[in-house]
Image: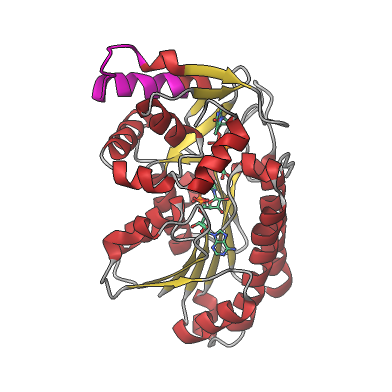
Amino acid sequence: MILVTGGAGFIGANFVLDWLATRDEPVLTLDKLTYAGNLQNLAALAGDPRHVFVQGDICDRALVEGLLARHRPRALVHFAAESHVDRSIHGPEAFIRTNVEGTFTLLEAARAYWSTLSDVESAAFRFHHVSTDEVYGSLAPDAAPFTETHPCLPNSPYSASKAASDHLARAWFHTYGLPVLTSHCSNNYGPFHFPEKLIPLLIVNACAQKPLPLYGDGLQVRDWLYVGDHCAAIRRILDAGRPGETYNIGGWNEMTNLAIVEQVCALLDALAPRADGIAYATQIVHVTDRPGHDRRYAIDARKIERELGWRPAETFASGLEKTVRWYLTHADWVKNTQSGSYRDWVLKQYGEGAT
Ligand code: NAD
Ligand code: DAU
């Protein structure tokens, strides 16, 4: 079996669902169920004997050691993190705790467990550390996309905490030989994406006839990848990646935030037009920029294609349409994310008038 941390969050839940849809190998999910974790994301697995869910904190060493000893996974896929840049600006502490201390705890527990395995088992064991392209920093408009050897230049508390965890993962391979794999992915989108992040926020706000907030001039650039493609890439790296290596994962799909909002609005105009016939784009507003906002990310994903034969299957047009349709048909899921604490966040980040 494999152990997945953060499997009740956006990418982790997609990963667990896709894994069990394509393989019979059982999954043990460990998740603290913070505001971003939602057991509803895994509801399709209720009663499935191949899935075990444990609510708990990756910083709890005794818990993690107990799970490893009892379930004896052959791999650990580590998604659990505080993941929202804006929240890291308002309150970095939780990011240091989970992303840095939590990853350290997992690495140490995995190392202790790994040292008890037989030669065959220890050679096959993998610790997959899921990281982000944000650790590379911001690119000039004409700079080449990030390769795996790009310097690590994080700019936000979130990306600094992820970079710190990357360094730990690297050191545990080089010093102790723990078979660590690291991947750096660009911006994901798709089902179960918490509506504090750009694409789901736009869809949910548009449908509620609320403002569609663009930070600053809206010309910041991100590379966007459908979440199912990210999950497929991680499966491929787990199967065939070389321990100690890092792999960039991206969609070859750079876009400005303005272009994103325009496409979301156009899709909604076609799939769920406003009753008054007015275009959703009229709801776009420019708001105060994010402090230290990275201007551009772009991923060079040639290594994973060359060495492991992975390429994204989804185009942005097909992935975005799937995503918009998912949100339009999952009103209950959306409603359940709009808790009191989410409303408090929206008020803190966007001020009166946005809720
Ligand atoms: P998310 O915020 O949606 O989910 C994070 C999950 O981790 C939640 O279920 C949460 O309950 C859980 N968690 C948080 N702290 C925990 C703790 N201390 N112990 C156990 N569980 C805890 O995040 P996501 O967008 O799904 O991102 C998953 C991973 O992928 C993160 O490591 C993130 O850095 C990385 N990543 C995300 C993106 C993206 O676009 N979302 C892109 C590249 C990499
Ligand atoms: O690049 C990978 C990263 O992508 C992941 O590591 C992070 O976990 C994930 O949250 C994401 O980070 P971003 O900061 O790029 O994602 P976010 O959805 O918060 O913002 C995307 C862009 O949209 C960014 O330029 C900020 C902008 N934005 C965001 C929000 C929430 C707006 O203009 N308005 C908004 O209201």
Q: Is residue 201 visible?
A: yes
What residue is drawn where x is 47% and y is 41%? 188
| Count of number-bearing discs | 0
What residue is drawn where x is 30% and y is 41%? 331
Indicate whether 184 appears above or below 296: below
Q: Position of residue 72 (x, y in %)?
A: 47, 82
Indicate whether 229 appears above or below 43: above
Instruction: Using residue 252 as the reference point, say whether residue 245 is left or right of it.
Output: right
In the image shown, does 351 or 328 lie closer to the viewer? 351
Q: Quadrant of the N terminus?
A: bottom left
> What span is in magenta?
260-279
Is 308 within the magenta?
A: no
Q: Which is the main secondary structure of the residues drawn in magenta?
A: helix
Indicate whether 257 appears above or below 114: above
Coloring scheme used: secondary structure
Q: Is residue 147 visible?
A: no
Q: Position of residue 294 (x, y in %)?
A: 67, 31
Q: Position of residue 273 (x, y in %)?
A: 27, 20
Res 84 → quadrant: top right
Instruction: Using residue 87 as the reference point, say whether residue 22 is left or right of it.
Output: left
Is 262 within the magenta?
A: yes
Q: Position of residue 176 (x, y in %)?
A: 70, 74
In the image shown, does 27 or 81 lie closer to the viewer? 81
